[in-house]
Image: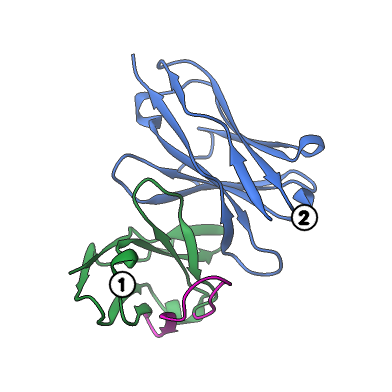
Amino acid sequence: EVLLVQSEAEVKKPGESLRISCKGFGYRFTNYWIGWVRQMPGKGLEWMGIIYPGNSDTRYSPSFKGQVTISVDRSISTAYLQWSSLKASDTAVYYCARRDAGPWYHFDYWGQGTLVTVSS
Amino acid sequence: SYEVTQPLSVSVALGQTARITCGGNNIGGKNVNWYQQKPGQAPVLVIYRDSKRPSGIPERFSGSNSGNTATLTISGAQAGDEADYYCQVWDSSFWVFGGGTKLTVL
């Protein structure tokens, strides 16, 4: 069974750094792109970026480029989303999702989401 | 950048057919995917490549795409179908989500 398991909720202060994780189970982690999606409170889904664990090829949405860093540790089948200096506006639920194999562009499995709260 | 637009809300009577649209410039030339999201839960893929259903998704969910509009159709809507629905396309290396449509089953 394919599973994406994300790290627990975080409460941080503005200016702090943070890394959240997404661990893949039940499939060959290096063969599938992993994307990150933001959902601000009461709002819709926003694509942030995507990484291919096989070679760490990474693409960012223009809206998030320079604001976050996406990385991967192939040895433990885990993708990461990282901030160096959080802002209150980063408060949101963050989902990781697996892009289906082949020349298609849908996300077939999603993590359970990680709530990040940034407040002084 | 490419944009897709969805109605904010759609209502349907129990057992009737709901149609949720996703508009975009020549969206018929792209593959459209649809996700269902219930409160407090992660999104779930319900339609991919315009009209294909993942395993486990009921047959009452179907999709079409032509011209400037893609449509998610829910035939015989049930109370459990009440959720937010998002369309999504890929354009020039970017993934684009619609703003989402809240489906209310009356």
Residue B78 — which label?
1
**Of the two numbered discs 1 and 2 in the rendering, the one whose residue sits closer to the viewer:** 1
Chain in green colour:
B
Regarding residue A119, the answer to whether it shows in the image is yes
How many numbered circles does the render carry?
2
Q: Provide the secondary structure element on which disc 1 rests.
A: loop
Residue name at image x 19 percent, y 76 percent:
B13
Residue name at image x 44 percent, y 29 percent:
A116
Residue name at image x 30 percent, y 78 percent:
B19
When asked about the image quadrant of residue B78, the answer is bottom left
Which percent across, then down, holds residue A64? 49, 40
Image hue for chain A: blue
Is B104 located above or below residue A27 in the figure? below
Is A3 located above or below residue B29 in the figure? above
Which percent across, then down, holds residue B92? 56, 63
Q: Is residue B63 magenta?
A: yes
Which percent across, then down, holds residue A81? 58, 34
Q: The residue marked by circle 1 belongs to what chain? A: B
Q: The residue marked by circle 2 belongs to what chain? A: A
Is A95 located above or below residue B44 in the figure? above
In space, the residues marked 1 and 2 are separated at their CA atoms by 37 Å
Residue under pointer 2: A31
In the rendered view, does B43 fall on the left or right side of B105? right
Which amino acid, mark 2? Asn
Report the magenta residues as a range: B51-69
Q: Quadrant of the C terminus of chain B?
A: bottom left
Q: Is residue B88 magenta?
A: no
